[in-house]
Amino acid sequence: MEFLFLGTAASEGWPALFCNCPQCKAAAELGGRNIRTRSQALLDGHILFDFPPDTYKHKLDGALDLSRVDLLLVTHSHSDHLYPNDLATRGAPYGHNFTAPTLHIASGHDALARIERVNGYENNKLSNIVTHELRAYEPFECCGARVIPLPADHLKSEDAFCYAIETNGKHILYLHDTGEVIPDVLDYLAHAGICYDLISFDCCYCVKDNTHLHGHMGLPNVVRLRNKLLASGVCDRHTFCVVNHFSHNIAVTHESMTAAAAREGMLCSYDGMRLEI
């Protein structure tokens, strides 16, 4: 099984679109893995996590057949995770000869409503797309995957989800965007009796602790959460634990972030990073 990190930045990208801060200037000068696009990931070539404005760039950079994607899991409706305008191109006259006949999109009510509203305003008809409204903890099975939507500590105004996925005998835990996971979720994971093969952790604050303890995490928050998951058997020393979804507002390079994560026994993601699980 392959897990591909397509984009690994928070909403502004890194370097950010209109920013001349030292962090953004340094990233532009260093290049390489210091250049980060908006967060997105692809599992086994056909399960896509989120649909940011950078999806087209990810297709080009990875030489991807995105028409092969048959399941799109959207975490929430913020525009760096959901840019619904481009979904209209999955139909004539914009696209033809799809590898997968149907794209299933699963998310909470507000994200799905945004998809319908934007495409209605653009007067585009969503072609070959089926939407599924998810509810917390209710299993959803589609395209060879069993998905559990888990409440994220991110928004009070809508259902924002993290995702636990089982497919092809492997288990993935995708923890974006969220603060330190709420107790009910920790209890659910502990009692489910599953040890995950890969966990992707929100690390928007990079090496800095998020003292607000909600919305996003930094490395100290991630380490505390990872240790709780270790203690409850949700992960073990064989689990790929990866920090992801970084904001440019913290002055770290990819090299220094990788070193900080490695000291905690974790990996630091970068755009185009592939893990074989």
Image (cartoon, grey):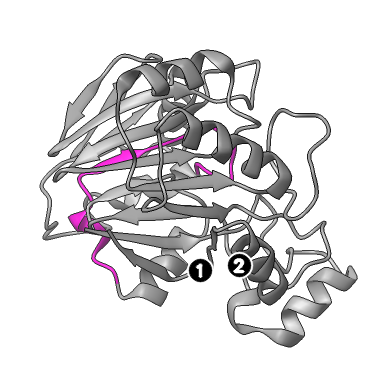
Q: Which residues are magenta?
A: 64-82
Q: Earlier in the sequence, mark 2 or mark 1?
A: 2
- Amino acid beneath label 2: Arg
Rendered view: 116 above or below 56: above
Left or right of 25 in this view: 4: left
Residue position marked by numbered label 1 in the rendering: 271
Q: Position of residue 133 (x, y in %)?
A: 34, 19
Residue 196, visible in the rendered structure: yes
- 248 sits to left or right of 201: right
| Residue hosting label 2 | 36
Residue 129, horizontal then vertical, whole percent? 23, 37
The amino acid type found where label 1 is placed reads Asp
Circles 2, 1 touching at the beta carbon (< 8 Å): yes
Residue 188, image x and y in percent?
41, 17
What main secondary structure does the magenta stretch of the protein show? loop
Q: Nearer the viewer, residue 122 or 104?
A: 104
